[in-house]
Amino acid sequence: MIPCQRPLFDIPEDVAYFNCAYTAPLLRAAQAAGQTAMKAKAAPWTITPPDFFVTTESVRKLFAQLIGCPADRIALIPAVSYGIALAAQNLPLARGQAIVVLAEQFPSNIYSWQRLADRKQARITTVSRPVDCDWTPAVLQAIDDQTAIAALPNCHWTDGTLLDLVRIAEKCRAVGAALVVDGTQSLGAMPFSIAAVQPDFLVTTAHKWLLGPYSFGFCYVAPRWQSGIPLEENWLNRAGSEDFARLVDYRHDYQPGARRFDVGEVSNFILAPVAQIALRQLLDWQVAKTAETLRAKTGAIADRAVQLGLDVAPAATRGPHMLGLSMPGGLAAELSARLAREKVYVSVRGDSIRISPHLYNNDADLERFLTVLEKVIPGKQATGPSPIRPVK
Protein backbone atom coordinates (compact mmCIF):
# COMPACT_ATOMS: atom_id res chain seq x y z
CA MET A 1 0.00 0.00 0.00
CA ILE A 2 1.29 3.44 -0.93
CA PRO A 3 1.03 6.05 1.87
CA CYS A 4 -1.03 9.16 1.19
CA GLN A 5 0.80 11.33 -1.35
CA ARG A 6 -1.11 14.57 -0.71
CA PRO A 7 2.06 16.63 0.05
CA LEU A 8 3.10 16.12 -3.57
CA PHE A 9 -0.02 18.01 -4.72
CA ASP A 10 -1.22 21.55 -4.11
CA ILE A 11 -4.65 20.62 -2.68
CA PRO A 12 -6.11 22.67 0.19
CA GLU A 13 -6.86 20.70 3.33
CA ASP A 14 -10.56 21.58 3.17
CA VAL A 15 -10.95 20.18 -0.37
CA ALA A 16 -11.80 16.50 -0.87
CA TYR A 17 -11.26 15.81 -4.56
CA PHE A 18 -12.75 12.48 -5.71
CA ASN A 19 -12.79 13.45 -9.39
CA CYS A 20 -9.59 12.25 -11.02
CA ALA A 21 -11.67 10.68 -13.81
CA TYR A 22 -12.80 14.23 -14.67
CA THR A 23 -9.34 15.80 -14.66
CA ALA A 24 -6.41 15.30 -12.30
CA PRO A 25 -4.63 17.93 -10.22
CA LEU A 26 -1.02 18.49 -11.20
CA LEU A 27 1.87 17.43 -9.04
CA ARG A 28 3.76 20.31 -7.47
CA ALA A 29 6.83 19.21 -9.42
CA ALA A 30 4.83 19.20 -12.66
CA GLN A 31 3.61 22.73 -11.92
CA ALA A 32 7.21 23.82 -11.43
CA ALA A 33 8.26 22.19 -14.69
CA GLY A 34 5.48 24.02 -16.53
CA GLN A 35 6.50 27.34 -15.00
CA THR A 36 10.12 26.75 -16.00
CA ALA A 37 8.98 25.92 -19.52
CA MET A 38 6.94 29.13 -19.69
CA LYS A 39 9.99 31.17 -18.67
CA ALA A 40 12.03 29.48 -21.41
CA LYS A 41 9.40 30.39 -24.02
CA ALA A 42 9.52 33.98 -22.77
CA ALA A 43 13.23 33.92 -23.65
CA PRO A 44 13.18 32.01 -26.98
CA TRP A 45 16.85 32.66 -27.64
CA THR A 46 17.47 29.98 -25.01
CA ILE A 47 15.56 27.36 -27.06
CA THR A 48 17.86 25.39 -29.35
CA PRO A 49 17.01 22.97 -32.21
CA PRO A 50 17.70 19.87 -30.04
CA ASP A 51 15.04 21.14 -27.60
CA PHE A 52 12.42 20.36 -30.26
CA PHE A 53 13.16 16.65 -29.80
CA VAL A 54 14.68 15.87 -26.40
CA THR A 55 11.58 16.12 -24.16
CA THR A 56 9.37 14.66 -26.88
CA GLU A 57 11.46 11.52 -27.03
CA SER A 58 11.62 11.34 -23.25
CA VAL A 59 7.84 11.33 -22.79
CA ARG A 60 7.45 8.87 -25.66
CA LYS A 61 9.86 6.49 -23.92
CA LEU A 62 8.25 6.95 -20.49
CA PHE A 63 4.75 6.20 -21.76
CA ALA A 64 6.05 3.18 -23.68
CA GLN A 65 7.59 1.92 -20.45
CA LEU A 66 4.25 2.34 -18.67
CA ILE A 67 2.47 -0.01 -21.11
CA GLY A 68 5.41 -2.26 -21.97
CA CYS A 69 6.42 -1.62 -25.57
CA PRO A 70 9.20 0.00 -27.63
CA ALA A 71 9.11 3.80 -27.79
CA ASP A 72 8.86 3.88 -31.58
CA ARG A 73 5.33 2.45 -31.38
CA ILE A 74 4.07 5.61 -29.67
CA ALA A 75 2.72 8.72 -31.40
CA LEU A 76 2.13 11.95 -29.49
CA ILE A 77 -1.35 13.38 -30.02
CA PRO A 78 -3.45 16.25 -28.61
CA ALA A 79 -6.62 14.32 -27.75
CA VAL A 80 -8.32 10.92 -27.78
CA SER A 81 -10.49 12.04 -30.70
CA TYR A 82 -7.30 12.61 -32.73
CA GLY A 83 -6.06 9.09 -32.05
CA ILE A 84 -9.45 7.53 -32.80
CA ALA A 85 -9.65 9.46 -36.07
CA LEU A 86 -6.15 8.19 -36.89
CA ALA A 87 -7.26 4.60 -36.31
CA ALA A 88 -10.43 5.13 -38.35
CA GLN A 89 -8.38 6.46 -41.24
CA ASN A 90 -6.08 3.44 -41.37
CA LEU A 91 -8.19 0.39 -40.45
CA PRO A 92 -10.02 -1.46 -43.23
CA LEU A 93 -13.82 -1.59 -43.19
CA ALA A 94 -15.99 -3.09 -45.92
CA ARG A 95 -19.60 -2.47 -46.80
CA GLY A 96 -21.91 -4.36 -44.44
CA GLN A 97 -19.26 -5.00 -41.81
CA ALA A 98 -19.69 -3.90 -38.19
CA ILE A 99 -17.90 -1.75 -35.63
CA VAL A 100 -18.60 -2.89 -32.06
CA VAL A 101 -18.95 -0.25 -29.32
CA LEU A 102 -20.50 -0.04 -25.85
CA ALA A 103 -23.75 1.63 -24.89
CA GLU A 104 -23.10 5.13 -23.54
CA GLN A 105 -19.47 4.98 -24.63
CA PHE A 106 -17.58 8.25 -24.44
CA PRO A 107 -18.32 10.33 -27.58
CA SER A 108 -14.67 10.77 -28.62
CA ASN A 109 -14.66 7.01 -29.28
CA ILE A 110 -17.97 7.12 -31.19
CA TYR A 111 -18.17 9.99 -33.66
CA SER A 112 -15.30 8.93 -35.94
CA TRP A 113 -16.75 5.42 -36.15
CA GLN A 114 -20.18 6.75 -37.02
CA ARG A 115 -18.70 8.82 -39.83
CA LEU A 116 -16.63 5.88 -41.07
CA ALA A 117 -19.61 3.52 -40.99
CA ASP A 118 -21.73 6.01 -42.94
CA ARG A 119 -19.01 6.51 -45.54
CA LYS A 120 -18.33 2.78 -45.98
CA GLN A 121 -22.00 1.73 -45.73
CA ALA A 122 -21.12 -0.34 -42.69
CA ARG A 123 -22.94 -0.48 -39.34
CA ILE A 124 -22.41 0.19 -35.65
CA THR A 125 -23.18 -2.66 -33.24
CA THR A 126 -23.87 -1.28 -29.77
CA VAL A 127 -23.53 -3.61 -26.79
CA SER A 128 -26.21 -2.88 -24.17
CA ARG A 129 -25.26 -2.46 -20.54
CA PRO A 130 -25.54 -5.89 -18.84
CA VAL A 131 -27.74 -6.22 -15.78
CA ASP A 132 -24.95 -8.00 -13.87
CA CYS A 133 -22.40 -5.27 -14.79
CA ASP A 134 -20.17 -7.83 -16.56
CA TRP A 135 -19.49 -6.38 -20.01
CA THR A 136 -17.15 -9.10 -21.26
CA PRO A 137 -19.62 -11.90 -22.14
CA ALA A 138 -21.89 -9.43 -23.93
CA VAL A 139 -19.00 -7.99 -25.94
CA LEU A 140 -17.71 -11.44 -26.84
CA GLN A 141 -21.15 -12.39 -28.11
CA ALA A 142 -21.36 -9.22 -30.22
CA ILE A 143 -18.05 -9.87 -32.00
CA ASP A 144 -18.51 -12.24 -34.94
CA ASP A 145 -17.20 -12.85 -38.45
CA GLN A 146 -18.88 -9.64 -39.64
CA THR A 147 -16.96 -7.52 -37.15
CA ALA A 148 -14.19 -5.41 -38.66
CA ILE A 149 -13.36 -3.25 -35.64
CA ALA A 150 -14.03 -3.41 -31.92
CA ALA A 151 -13.61 0.10 -30.46
CA LEU A 152 -13.75 -0.28 -26.71
CA PRO A 153 -12.49 1.11 -23.39
CA ASN A 154 -10.72 -0.86 -20.68
CA CYS A 155 -13.46 0.21 -18.28
CA HIS A 156 -16.65 2.18 -18.75
CA TRP A 157 -16.14 5.88 -18.19
CA THR A 158 -19.32 6.39 -16.13
CA ASP A 159 -18.70 3.84 -13.37
CA GLY A 160 -15.44 1.94 -13.90
CA THR A 161 -17.07 -1.38 -14.84
CA LEU A 162 -14.44 -3.55 -16.51
CA LEU A 163 -13.88 -5.30 -19.81
CA ASP A 164 -11.52 -8.27 -20.04
CA LEU A 165 -9.49 -7.00 -22.97
CA VAL A 166 -7.28 -10.08 -23.13
CA ARG A 167 -10.27 -12.34 -23.86
CA ILE A 168 -11.85 -9.76 -26.15
CA ALA A 169 -8.60 -9.36 -28.10
CA GLU A 170 -8.38 -13.13 -28.57
CA LYS A 171 -11.89 -13.12 -30.03
CA CYS A 172 -11.00 -10.22 -32.31
CA ARG A 173 -7.96 -12.03 -33.66
CA ALA A 174 -10.01 -15.20 -34.17
CA VAL A 175 -12.50 -13.40 -36.44
CA GLY A 176 -9.96 -11.06 -38.08
CA ALA A 177 -11.20 -7.88 -36.38
CA ALA A 178 -9.04 -4.96 -35.27
CA LEU A 179 -9.10 -3.85 -31.62
CA VAL A 180 -8.95 -0.15 -30.78
CA VAL A 181 -8.71 0.62 -27.05
CA ASP A 182 -9.56 3.90 -25.37
CA GLY A 183 -7.39 3.72 -22.26
CA THR A 184 -8.26 7.16 -20.94
CA GLN A 185 -10.01 5.95 -17.78
CA SER A 186 -7.53 3.22 -16.88
CA LEU A 187 -3.93 3.88 -17.94
CA GLY A 188 -1.90 5.02 -14.95
CA ALA A 189 -4.39 3.62 -12.43
CA MET A 190 -4.60 0.02 -13.70
CA PRO A 191 -1.79 -2.12 -15.11
CA PHE A 192 -1.93 -2.56 -18.88
CA SER A 193 0.22 -4.89 -20.98
CA ILE A 194 0.61 -4.43 -24.72
CA ALA A 195 2.01 -7.96 -24.92
CA ALA A 196 -1.06 -9.45 -23.23
CA VAL A 197 -3.74 -7.46 -25.08
CA GLN A 198 -2.03 -6.86 -28.45
CA PRO A 199 -4.30 -3.99 -29.56
CA ASP A 200 -4.07 -2.48 -33.02
CA PHE A 201 -4.36 1.02 -31.55
CA LEU A 202 -4.38 2.23 -27.94
CA VAL A 203 -5.31 5.85 -27.30
CA THR A 204 -5.30 7.99 -24.17
CA THR A 205 -5.23 11.55 -22.96
CA ALA A 206 -2.74 12.63 -20.29
CA HIS A 207 -4.88 14.86 -18.09
CA LYS A 208 -6.75 12.21 -16.09
CA TRP A 209 -5.08 9.14 -14.56
CA LEU A 210 -1.72 10.01 -16.13
CA LEU A 211 -1.76 13.18 -13.97
CA GLY A 212 -0.61 15.27 -16.91
CA PRO A 213 -1.67 18.37 -18.85
CA TYR A 214 -4.75 18.95 -20.96
CA SER A 215 -4.38 18.80 -24.78
CA PHE A 216 -1.66 16.16 -24.59
CA GLY A 217 -1.95 12.42 -25.16
CA PHE A 218 -0.53 9.22 -26.57
CA CYS A 219 -1.39 6.71 -29.28
CA TYR A 220 0.11 3.23 -29.51
CA VAL A 221 0.21 1.96 -33.09
CA ALA A 222 0.88 -1.74 -33.72
CA PRO A 223 3.78 -2.39 -36.12
CA ARG A 224 1.56 -3.62 -38.95
CA TRP A 225 -0.15 -0.20 -39.18
CA GLN A 226 2.97 1.95 -38.94
CA SER A 227 3.21 2.47 -42.70
CA GLY A 228 -0.24 4.07 -42.66
CA ILE A 229 -1.40 7.58 -43.52
CA PRO A 230 -1.03 10.35 -40.91
CA LEU A 231 -3.91 12.72 -40.24
CA GLU A 232 -1.64 15.62 -41.19
CA GLU A 233 1.66 16.24 -42.91
CA ASN A 234 4.06 18.31 -40.85
CA TRP A 235 7.74 19.04 -40.97
CA LEU A 236 8.58 17.36 -37.68
CA ASN A 237 7.23 13.94 -38.67
CA ARG A 238 9.41 13.81 -41.79
CA ALA A 239 12.83 12.17 -41.79
CA GLY A 240 15.76 14.52 -41.31
CA SER A 241 13.75 17.25 -39.56
CA GLU A 242 16.50 17.52 -36.92
CA ASP A 243 18.61 19.41 -39.49
CA PHE A 244 16.95 22.83 -39.57
CA ALA A 245 19.31 24.05 -42.29
CA ARG A 246 18.01 21.42 -44.75
CA LEU A 247 14.24 21.58 -44.14
CA VAL A 248 13.55 22.78 -47.68
CA ASP A 249 15.15 19.60 -49.02
CA TYR A 250 11.67 18.07 -48.93
CA ARG A 251 11.53 14.44 -47.90
CA HIS A 252 9.02 11.76 -48.83
CA ASP A 253 10.07 9.47 -45.99
CA TYR A 254 8.94 9.83 -42.38
CA GLN A 255 10.49 9.61 -38.95
CA PRO A 256 10.72 5.94 -37.86
CA GLY A 257 7.88 3.94 -36.33
CA ALA A 258 4.73 5.66 -35.12
CA ARG A 259 6.36 9.10 -35.15
CA ARG A 260 4.85 9.70 -38.60
CA PHE A 261 1.50 10.00 -36.78
CA ASP A 262 2.68 12.72 -34.37
CA VAL A 263 0.54 15.85 -34.22
CA GLY A 264 1.95 19.05 -35.70
CA GLU A 265 4.12 21.13 -33.34
CA VAL A 266 4.64 17.96 -31.35
CA SER A 267 7.59 19.50 -29.46
CA ASN A 268 5.08 21.36 -27.25
CA PHE A 269 7.61 23.12 -25.03
CA ILE A 270 5.03 23.93 -22.33
CA LEU A 271 3.05 20.70 -21.95
CA ALA A 272 5.66 18.03 -22.66
CA PRO A 273 7.78 18.82 -19.54
CA VAL A 274 4.63 18.62 -17.38
CA ALA A 275 3.74 15.21 -18.83
CA GLN A 276 7.32 14.05 -18.34
CA ILE A 277 7.27 14.74 -14.59
CA ALA A 278 3.91 13.01 -14.17
CA LEU A 279 4.96 9.87 -16.03
CA ARG A 280 8.15 9.58 -14.00
CA GLN A 281 6.13 9.77 -10.79
CA LEU A 282 3.65 7.11 -11.95
CA LEU A 283 6.50 4.77 -12.81
CA ASP A 284 8.13 5.43 -9.46
CA TRP A 285 4.90 4.58 -7.59
CA GLN A 286 4.37 1.52 -9.84
CA VAL A 287 0.95 1.18 -11.42
CA ALA A 288 0.15 -2.15 -9.77
CA LYS A 289 0.77 -0.69 -6.30
CA THR A 290 -1.25 2.40 -7.17
CA ALA A 291 -4.14 0.20 -8.26
CA GLU A 292 -4.17 -1.82 -5.05
CA THR A 293 -4.03 1.32 -2.92
CA LEU A 294 -6.95 2.84 -4.82
CA ARG A 295 -8.86 -0.44 -4.54
CA ALA A 296 -8.81 -0.06 -0.76
CA LYS A 297 -10.29 3.43 -1.03
CA THR A 298 -13.05 2.59 -3.50
CA GLY A 299 -13.77 -0.66 -1.67
CA ALA A 300 -14.31 1.17 1.61
CA ILE A 301 -16.68 3.64 -0.05
CA ALA A 302 -18.56 0.82 -1.79
CA ASP A 303 -19.03 -1.08 1.48
CA ARG A 304 -20.52 1.93 3.24
CA ALA A 305 -22.68 2.82 0.23
CA VAL A 306 -24.18 -0.68 0.15
CA GLN A 307 -25.05 -0.38 3.85
CA LEU A 308 -26.98 2.75 2.92
CA GLY A 309 -28.97 0.92 0.27
CA LEU A 310 -27.17 2.29 -2.78
CA ASP A 311 -26.46 0.28 -5.90
CA VAL A 312 -22.80 -0.46 -6.62
CA ALA A 313 -21.36 -2.82 -9.22
CA PRO A 314 -19.88 -6.02 -7.72
CA ALA A 315 -16.21 -5.71 -6.87
CA ALA A 316 -15.23 -8.34 -9.46
CA THR A 317 -16.75 -6.26 -12.28
CA ARG A 318 -15.25 -2.85 -11.55
CA GLY A 319 -11.82 -1.30 -11.74
CA PRO A 320 -9.84 -0.56 -8.58
CA HIS A 321 -9.89 3.20 -9.08
CA MET A 322 -13.46 4.20 -9.84
CA LEU A 323 -17.04 3.30 -8.97
CA GLY A 324 -20.56 4.51 -9.59
CA LEU A 325 -23.23 4.92 -6.90
CA SER A 326 -26.89 4.98 -7.86
CA MET A 327 -30.30 4.84 -6.23
CA PRO A 328 -33.89 5.20 -7.46
CA GLY A 329 -35.32 8.66 -6.94
CA GLY A 330 -32.64 10.98 -8.24
CA LEU A 331 -29.76 10.53 -5.83
CA ALA A 332 -27.21 11.81 -8.34
CA ALA A 333 -28.43 15.40 -8.66
CA GLU A 334 -29.03 15.93 -4.95
CA LEU A 335 -25.83 14.31 -3.77
CA SER A 336 -23.60 16.12 -6.25
CA ALA A 337 -24.89 19.56 -5.21
CA ARG A 338 -24.68 18.72 -1.50
CA LEU A 339 -21.14 17.45 -1.81
CA ALA A 340 -19.99 20.52 -3.73
CA ARG A 341 -21.26 22.77 -0.94
CA GLU A 342 -19.08 20.76 1.45
CA LYS A 343 -16.07 21.07 -0.91
CA VAL A 344 -16.28 17.40 -1.80
CA TYR A 345 -16.03 16.97 -5.56
CA VAL A 346 -17.39 14.09 -7.63
CA SER A 347 -19.06 13.76 -11.06
CA VAL A 348 -22.54 12.84 -12.23
CA ARG A 349 -22.32 10.43 -15.14
CA GLY A 350 -25.50 8.86 -16.47
CA ASP A 351 -27.58 7.66 -13.52
CA SER A 352 -24.57 7.41 -11.21
CA ILE A 353 -22.41 9.48 -8.98
CA ARG A 354 -18.90 8.66 -10.16
CA ILE A 355 -16.27 8.42 -7.41
CA SER A 356 -12.65 8.49 -8.59
CA PRO A 357 -10.04 8.98 -5.83
CA HIS A 358 -6.27 9.02 -6.11
CA LEU A 359 -3.26 8.80 -3.85
CA TYR A 360 -3.81 12.39 -2.66
CA ASN A 361 -7.07 11.44 -0.87
CA ASN A 362 -6.69 10.94 2.88
CA ASP A 363 -8.85 9.55 5.67
CA ALA A 364 -10.44 12.96 6.31
CA ASP A 365 -11.58 13.15 2.68
CA LEU A 366 -13.21 9.75 2.90
CA GLU A 367 -14.97 10.48 6.18
CA ARG A 368 -16.26 13.82 4.91
CA PHE A 369 -17.70 12.18 1.80
CA LEU A 370 -19.32 9.37 3.77
CA THR A 371 -20.79 11.78 6.33
CA VAL A 372 -22.52 13.81 3.62
CA LEU A 373 -23.65 10.60 1.93
CA GLU A 374 -25.41 9.50 5.13
CA LYS A 375 -27.12 12.87 5.56
CA VAL A 376 -28.54 12.80 2.03
CA ILE A 377 -30.29 9.47 2.64
CA PRO A 378 -32.79 10.02 5.48
CA GLY A 379 -33.30 7.19 7.94
CA LYS A 380 -30.10 5.43 6.92
CA GLN A 381 -27.04 5.24 9.09
CA ALA A 382 -24.03 3.22 8.03
CA THR A 383 -22.31 1.03 10.56
CA GLY A 384 -18.90 -0.50 10.59
CA PRO A 385 -15.27 0.52 10.94
CA SER A 386 -13.59 3.60 9.50
CA PRO A 387 -13.11 3.09 5.75
CA ILE A 388 -9.33 2.73 5.93
CA ARG A 389 -6.79 2.76 8.68
CA PRO A 390 -4.94 6.03 9.11
CA VAL A 391 -1.64 6.17 7.26
CA LYS A 392 1.32 6.64 9.58
Image (cartoon, rainbow, N blue to C red):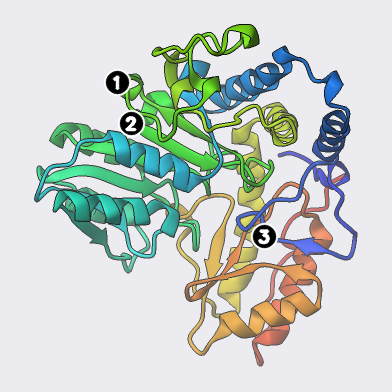
- Please tell me whether residue 107 is drawn above or below residue 271 in the rendered image: below
Q: Position of residue 181 (x, y in %)?
A: 39, 41
Tell me: 36 left or right of 179.
right
Compute the Cα span from label 2 to label 3.
30 Å
* Whole-number angstrom distance, CA of label 3 to CA of label 1: 37 Å
Whether the residues at callouts 1 and 2 have beta carbons within 8 Å, the answer is yes
Q: Compute the Cα span from label 1 to label 2.
A: 8 Å
- Residue 240's label in the rendered image is none
Please tell me whether mark 2 or mark 3 is closer to you in this view.
2
Q: Say which residue label 2 marks.
A: 200
Q: Residue at x 40, y 43 (%)?
A: 84
Badge 1 marks a residue whose secondary structure is helix
Going by the image, does 93 lie left or right of 145? right
| Three-letter residue code for mark 2 | Asp
* Label 2 or label 3, whichever comes before in sequence order: 3
Dot 3 amino acid type: Asn
Residue lying farthest to the front in this orientation: 248
On the image, the x and y values in percent for residue 292 come to: 61, 42
Label 3 residue SS: loop
Amino acid under disc 1:
Arg
Q: Which mark is residue 224?
A: 1
In the image, residue 299 above or below residue 204: below
Residue 70 seen in this snapshot: no
Image quarter of residue 107: bottom left
Q: Residue tagged by mark 3?
A: 19
